[in-house]
């Protein structure tokens, strides 16, 4: 099935799901928090979201272990291993749901918590939950009730002692553990099952002292309880860390060798097109919008180009898909794709896009300091921690000629390649390839649309800058060692003349600032950034703006260029 | 963490179980340095896992099948069951008191010996499975390995990068980078390749 057929299918599915549930799922996905199954029931999560790999296997295992524990005594440890952004927390939620569905005639005491939980509050919860469950149970006999009340009295004393003496964590645990043991003795008589689920075990990674007190609690329960199931959710690294600790930790030492492991790759595997279609259908339902097959294909292409379809990180992939779809939704509101496509059809698009990237996009990308150069054939330079690196945009053959000249001058150049030319042959060129023409449409749309107000245009430029950053490999290019290493070998400041020229120009008299400002302020700049750029104080800059009021004006803390 | 020599040991043992080999023949299978191979062979001899005998001018290595006694016994039971559905095989053996890990390690031995084929298992995976024999025996699937070690062994045995195989079979194995040290300290996770296979095909008649 192609992506538009998939979307059609998903639209049908989502139309049957209540809007409230759709909104809930959408919010959870956007905030990267696990979906609580009870909130979406009776709708099955696998129907509306991509299945988690390994979940079936895990469900079978957990159900089997519960069945065993109902019949016989037993102690089990299960590791659910999945990478970051995989499926751990979602599976953690799922187990809570499994527990709810298990025949209530058999008591299950569930403790589901994150490794970040404070040990004292956990101990408190355990004591209070077990005693509350026992006291409210019909099965409890009078003598047990008395015993229980005695234990609770002991707990109150311990609690008081702790609050008075403000003892260390170790002694807190030692104080409460005997109380928990006594409670478990009663639980054992009822043949109840204790389930301990620990999410985010990675938080213990590299910090045994953080884990140690939990380990003591786990061991106490493991030794005392006759029916207990532990489920730990970890990444592979943390799993290995726990394996190493099994040599020194009494709980892991006795449980690790017999532990069950279920591993899940977390990734979408071949299902990324389903994910795009499902998320698009979800957004359509929540935001009352419609995506075209073309737009979905673009999202799919970007996801594949950025290799997110093969990443292990479902969370990142989901967020990227949602963010792209929402950007497209925003651009669609102003029909920017259509305007841009028209311009590309008439052949003007590429040039407008090239100019737009330089004058409107690059400097709006947060974290990237891009300064446009008024002179020189490079369009500007990007400031890095170790120096400055010129940027050249390639949209035509003339640009390639200009680039060849620049190559003699600089040790490294960032090329923004709009025409798909291969520059990999030249180690001096760090090329940022714009793989799909479609991603330039909205930019051309923003520039050419005559329906936009200044503030709308500004907002859209900012949104586009963010879009540009996420659909290209800009971040990885900026982080790539190629740039850093070259700069280390040859300090670019010595080689690049552009900044020097700027510095020189800055020293000239007031009259000559106009061209610099015209180049620097394409749309608007904050007064602060202009001060920084010119290395002058605010008063001086305000005087300059006053002088060139024909070209600029100040509004708030920004200097705007008159159109 | 398991070493590459340990993985190669597993393979050598299973190859020798199939047929005795002289050093040249072993070298042909594993393009590793002679010194490394010698040390692996000497270690196996010391541990009494393999034996060596001079035949003519060359030394011939063979294994002591007793070290595989359990697997060979389970394999015999599997064959005697005359059942081809994997689910039934697991169930029947569980009823006889064999754990899943034992059945899996026996299946690996049988795969290495060429006694059986399991439906839907690609040849690359069947070839690489013997590496994991000792881990599957001790802790079962999924096998978690040091990525670098897996890479080296894959190059030796399959003459290809493990990442290529992992990309080909994302349901079976995948690579996870270490959050701080990257791929160099990453992991390869291998799940049971025959989890979703339905049948085994016994090649050798009893």
Image: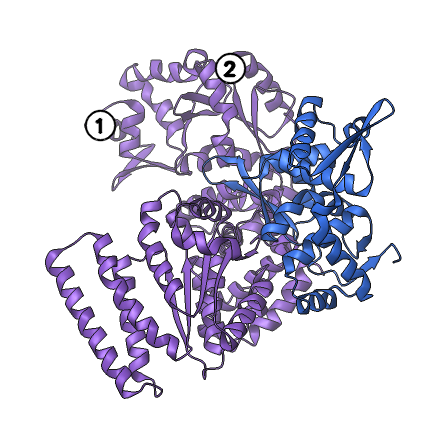
Residue A389: x %, y % from top left: 46, 22
Q: Which chain is blue?
A: B
Q: Residue A96 falls in which quadrant of the image?
A: bottom left
Q: Residues within 10 Å of mark 2 (few under 14, many from 20)?
A: some
> Residue placed at 62% from the left, 20% from the top?
A426
* Mark positioned earlier in the residue sequence (2 or 1): 2
Q: Residue furthest left?
A: A164
Residue A205: x %, y % from top left: 40, 45
Residue B29: x %, y % from top left: 78, 32
Which corner quadrant holds the N terminus of chain A?
bottom right
Which mark is drawn over residue A543? Answer: 1
Q: Residues within 10 Å of mark 1 (few under 14, many from 20)?
A: few
Q: Colour of chain A?
A: purple
> Residue placed at 68% from the left, 22% from the top?
B35
Disc 2 and disc 1 in contact, CB within 8 angstroms: no
- Per the model, the C-alpha gap separating discs 2 and 1 is 36 Å
A9 vs A439: above or below: below
């Amino acid at each position: 099935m192609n992506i538009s057929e998939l979307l059609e299918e998903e639209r049908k599915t989502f139309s049957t799901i209540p809007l409230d549930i759709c909104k809930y799922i959408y919010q959870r996905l956007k905030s990267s928090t696990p979906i609580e199954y009870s909130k979406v029931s009776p709708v099955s999560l696998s129907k509306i979201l991509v299945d988690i790999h390994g979940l079936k296997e895990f469900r079978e295992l957990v159900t089997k272990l519960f069945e065993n524990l109902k019949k016989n005594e037993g102690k089990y440890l299960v590791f659910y291993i999945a990478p970051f952004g995989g499926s751990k927390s979602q599976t953690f939620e799922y187990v809570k749901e499994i527990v709810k569905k298990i025949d209530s005639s058999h008591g299950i005491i569930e403790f589901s918590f994150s490794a970040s939980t404070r040990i004292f509050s956990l101990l408190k919860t355990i004591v209070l939950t077990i005693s509350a469950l026992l006291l409210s149970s019909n099965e409890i006999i009078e003598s047990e009730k008395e015993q229980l009340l005695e234990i609770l009295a002991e707990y109150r004393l311990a609690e008081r002692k702790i609050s008075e003496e403000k003892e260390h964590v170790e002694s807190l645990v030692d104080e409460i553990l005997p109380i928990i043991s006594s409670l478990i003795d009663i639980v054992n008589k009822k043949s109840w099952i204790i389930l301990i689920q620990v999410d985010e075990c990675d938080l213990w990674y590299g910090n045994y002292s953080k884990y140690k007190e939990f380990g003591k609690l786990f061991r106490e329960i493991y030794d005392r309880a006759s029916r207990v199931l532990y489920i730990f959710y970890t990444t592979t690294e943390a799993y290995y860390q726990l394996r190493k600790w099994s040599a020194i930790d009494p709980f892991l030492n006795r449980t690790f060798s017999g532990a069950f492991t279920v591993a899940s790759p977390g990734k979408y595997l071949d299902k990324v097109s389903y994910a795009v279609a499902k998320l698009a259908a979800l957004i359509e339902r929540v935001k009352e919008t419609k995506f075209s097959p073309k737009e979905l294909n673009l999202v799919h292409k970007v996801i594949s180009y950025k290799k997110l379809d093969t990443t292990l990180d479902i969370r990142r992939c989901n967020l990227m898909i949602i963010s792209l779809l929402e950007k497209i939704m925003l651009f669609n509101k102003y029909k920017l794709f259509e305007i841009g496509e028209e311009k590309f059809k008439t052949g003007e698009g590429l040039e407008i896009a090239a100019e737009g990237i330089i004058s409107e996009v690059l400097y709006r990308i947060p974290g990237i300091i891009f300064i446009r150069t008024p002179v020189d054939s490079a369009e500007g330079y990007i400031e890095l921690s170790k120096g400055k690196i010129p940027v050249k945009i390639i949209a035509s053959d003339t640009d390639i000629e200009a680039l060849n000249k620049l190559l003699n001058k600089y040790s490294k150049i960032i090329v923004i390649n709009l025409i798909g030319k291969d520059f990999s042959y030249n180690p001096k060129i760090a090329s940022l390839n714009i793989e799909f023409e479609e991603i330039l449409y909205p930019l051309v749309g923003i520039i050419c649309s005559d329906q936009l107000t200044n503030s709308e245009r500004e907002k859209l430029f900012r949104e586009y800058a963010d879009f540009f950053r996420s659909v290209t490999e800009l971040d990885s290019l900026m982080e790539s060692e190629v740039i850093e290493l070259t700069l280390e070998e040859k300090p670019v400041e010595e080689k690049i003349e552009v900044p020097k020229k700027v510095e020189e120009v800055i020293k000239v008299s007031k009259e000559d600032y106009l061209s610099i400002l015209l180049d620097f302020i394409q749309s608007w700049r904050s007064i602060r950034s202009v001060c920084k750029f010119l290395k002058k104080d605010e008063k001086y800059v305000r005087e300059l703006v006053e002088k060139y009021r024909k070209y600029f004006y100040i509004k708030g803390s920004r200097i705007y260029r008159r159109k | 963490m398991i070493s590459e020599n340990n993985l190669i040991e597993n393979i050598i043992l299973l190859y020798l179980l199939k047929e005795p080999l002289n050093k040249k023949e072993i070298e042909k299978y594993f393009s590793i340095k002679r010194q490394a191979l010698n040390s692996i062979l000497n270690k196996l001899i010391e541990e009494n896992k393999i034996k060596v005998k001079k035949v003519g001018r060359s030394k011939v290595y063979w294994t002591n099948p007793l070290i595989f006694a359990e697997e060979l016994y389970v394999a015999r039971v599997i064959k005697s069951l005359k059942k081809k559905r994997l689910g039934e095989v697991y169930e029947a053996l569980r009823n006889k008191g064999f754990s899943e890990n034992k059945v899996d390690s026996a299946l690996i031995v049988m795969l290495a010996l060429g006694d059986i084929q399991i439906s839907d298992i690609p040849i690359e995976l069947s070839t690489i499975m013997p590496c994991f024999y000792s881990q599957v025996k001790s802790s079962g699937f999924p096998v978690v390995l040091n990525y670098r070690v897996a890479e080296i062994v894959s190059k030796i045995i399959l003459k290809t990068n493990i990442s290529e195989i992992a990309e080909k079979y994302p349901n079976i194995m995948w690579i996870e980078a270490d959050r701080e040290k990257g791929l160099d300290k990453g992991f390869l996770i291998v799940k049971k390749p025959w989890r979703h296979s339905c049948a085994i095909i016994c090649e050798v008649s009893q």
